[in-house]
Image: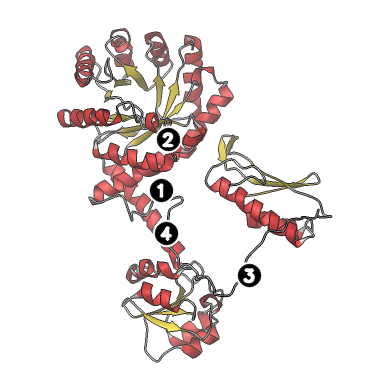
Amino acid sequence: MNILVATGRLAENAVKKAVGHEADVLVLGIDIAAFVTPALLLSSLPEKKYDLILVSGLAAGDFSRIEKEIDTPVRLGPKHAADLDFVLSYAENTNFSKKVPACELLIEKRRSGALEKIEELENRAVSPLTLKGVKLGGNSRMKVMAEIVDAGHLSNDELINKTLYFKEKGADIIDLGISLDTTAQEVRTAVETACKATQLPLSIDTLDPELINTALDSGIDIVLSLNSENIPEVSENIIRRNAAAVIIPDCAEELESLFSNIEYARNLGITNIIADPVLPPLGSGLVESLARYYEFRKRDTTTPLFFGAGNVTELMDADSIGINAMLSGIAMELEAGILFTPEFSHKAHNSVSELKIASRMMMLAKERGSAPKDLGIDLLSIKEKRRREFAVLPEDFIEAKQREKWHLDPAGCFKIAITNDEIRDGKLYSGKIVATNNGNSIAGETAKEILDTIIEKGIVSRLDHAAYLGRELMKAELALKFRRSYSQDDKF
């Protein structure tokens, strides 16, 4: 395929480096490639016939007329030269757009393709256990179980909202965490409330046999956790309800105890079994526990495995996104069926969504037989796959200095804040930026739309104030993007 990439003088070297031998490069008589016009492109074209011409993804012109004249499609390439090699690798099988930059078009195309593939793989998957249509184990995708901590002491509205929140974030199973002082009536109310809020499988997290039986009578689908002490008191109810049971060892360090308890449960007639070798926090035997998981899977290749990722993520002061990705990869190699997490600590907020994405990545990677990269979906948040070109510091430049004094804007000051995600009328609404001036509030999702509205309404009158608002609003936007809190004038 003969492709011509049109660019400006400033990006010439970067474009030629990214393109290599995959396309020809046309350097136009302008510095900035985004400023190309149809007339300039037409007057600069070589005589050679091309199958496709790519202009800057930031170009705003309408190239329809010259397309007809030269009988060659003119489409938007990527916004940055560094992405050209990535874009050109898809040129043979992609219809590039006149309106959407090629980099954005391909990202969405690859993402939708990845999600379609995951759905196809899941539909074909064979699993030893299925609850309410959710496959557990086998070659199905690892399912995310989200724990609602202390569910028995939440009000009905709080429990419903938390259930719906986790469902919207991607949870496949909702776990009701039960504290030691929870009564049987509170458990009954919690289970019945959660059952009304969602059709997802529900689990109960307690060792107390009375509370387990109450939950089973109220419609629970999975029981966490059973050992030799409580199995005799709940087994009949589990069998009668056809519920699933997560079996743990009597002592976390003893793998034989886990096998013994599983055999005990099966001999009593419990068939829907999930094994939990128990994953402790880092520093408390994590590596040894992984060895137990590995040994269990070698000896038992079919029983679904429970993997408590949250035990590690919650007790480590590091960003959860990378920890959850790595733990999911380990769980995939161990052929785990369930990834368990609460979002109890603030630093672990959004772990459910992170694990859901990670579980999808691992399914694709396993199917491809490759590392979990270049899949179409990812968990990159701060790091980038392709760096843009850095500028060169001019030899002659003015050293920037911060002004010591500031002046009050006659149009008034702004209080800037962000709201949290919330459930309203059964639907999850994302947080917003709120800018308030003299009792009037403007709410939006981006700094640009709020600042544009402020300028349009004439409620900023000084350039320094407008610049300040731009800085603070962008900090607020980044806080929303990275799910952080925000306080005006604090460092981000």
Q: Nearer the viewer, residue 186 or 387?
A: 387
Q: Which residue is mark 2?
A: 171
Is residue 116 or residue 60 the one in the foreground?
60
| Secondary element type, mark 3 | loop
Give the residue at mark 1: 379
Q: Residue furthest bottom?
A: 47
- x, y (%) of residue 329? 30, 41
Sequence-first tag of 2 and 3 = 2
Badge 1 amino acid: Leu
For numbered disc 2, what is the local secondary structure?
Answer: loop
Q: Is residue 405 above or below residue 354?
A: below
Q: Can you say whether 128 is above or below 239 in the image?
A: below
Q: Local crowd at mark 2 within 10 Å, few (<14), some, or many (≥20)?
A: many
Q: Position of residue 250 (x, y in %)?
A: 27, 14
Marks 2/4 in contact by CB < 8 Å: the verdict is: no
Mark 4 lies on residue: 107
Identity, as a three-letter code, of the amino acid under mark 2:
Ala
Which marked residue is nearer to the observer: mark 4 or mark 1? 1
Are the residues flagged by discs 1 and 3 in contact, CB closer than 8 Å? no
Amino acid type at circle 4 is Ile
Task: State how far apart marks 1 and 2 are (Cα).
Answer: 17 Å
User: CB under 8 Å between callouts 1 and 2?
Assistant: no
Query: In what quadrant of the picture does the N terminus appear?
Result: bottom left
Where residue 136 sits, quadrant-wise, is top left
Question: Can you tell which mark lies on residue 397?
Answer: none
Where does label 3 land, which residue? 398
User: Residue visible at 65% across and 55% down?
Assistant: 471
- Of all residues shown, which one is farthest toward the right? 410
Mark with earlier residue (2, 4): 4
Q: Is residue 218 above or below residue 67?
A: above
Q: Give, as a three-letter code, the residue at label 3.
A: Ile
